[in-house]
Image (tube, helix red, strand yellow):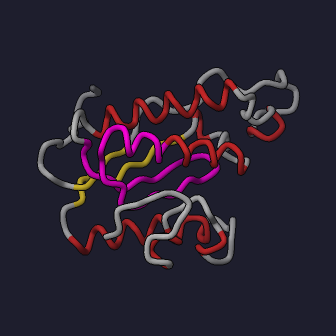
Amino acid sequence: MPVGLQRLYGQGHLHFITFSCYRRLPLLKSAQARDVFVCELARLRERMAFRLIGYVVMPEHVHLLLSEPALGTPSTVLHDLKLRTARRLRQHGKRPPASQSGLPSGDPPEAPRAFWQARFYDFNVFSQKKKREKLEYMHSNPVTRGLVSHPKDWPWSSWSNYAHRGKGRICVDLL
């Protein structure tokens, strides 16, 4: 682990996690790629038994608000999630061509070998106020970035789960 980076696990806190695609390239730009990610998140949530409070999948990064899994840590969740998503996208050829990935057009027409940045940001969330703040931040992210005019128009987030009392793209543990 890098010097100065501390991950606080075993405290019973939720974790607000942010991680990015390699060099912040928009490797999740397509709806298909975001669908694959959300599907893998749902599968992993069941398999590793963690509570998923909220999420948003953006073209080049992801935010999650989750509990620690029954076995392992948020680091193991992220490792498995990144690995499974990258493998599935590579298997099905869903990675965007260079022209959509943000690479210069003179580069070869294949996306970079790495899919994810190696590190991730983890913020321990223990107060109700911070939980709501992080959820609001996630749900407003597509609007702030100009991708949609209202959170309801971005299906790759937990906004609809909260707006429609649990009915969303995947199951989340409502706050």
Q: Write the start and end of the magenta stretch as one range.
A: 41-69
Report x, y in % for residue 108.
83, 21
Q: Nearer the viewer, residue 33 or 116?
A: 33
In percent of the image, x 29 and y 68: which residue is there?
131
Height in image: 138 above or below 98?
Answer: below
Mark count: 0
In percent of the image, x 67 and y 26: which residue is there?
90
| Left-right relation of 104 to 23 | right
Height in image: 16 above or below 112?
Answer: below
State which quarter of the image contains the C terminus: bottom left
Report x, y in % for residue 82.
49, 33
Report x, y in % for residue 106.
87, 26
State which quarter of the image contains the N terminus: top left
Q: Magenta includes 47? A: yes
| Left-right relation of 14 to 142 | left
In percent of the image, x 13 and y 43: which residue is there?
10
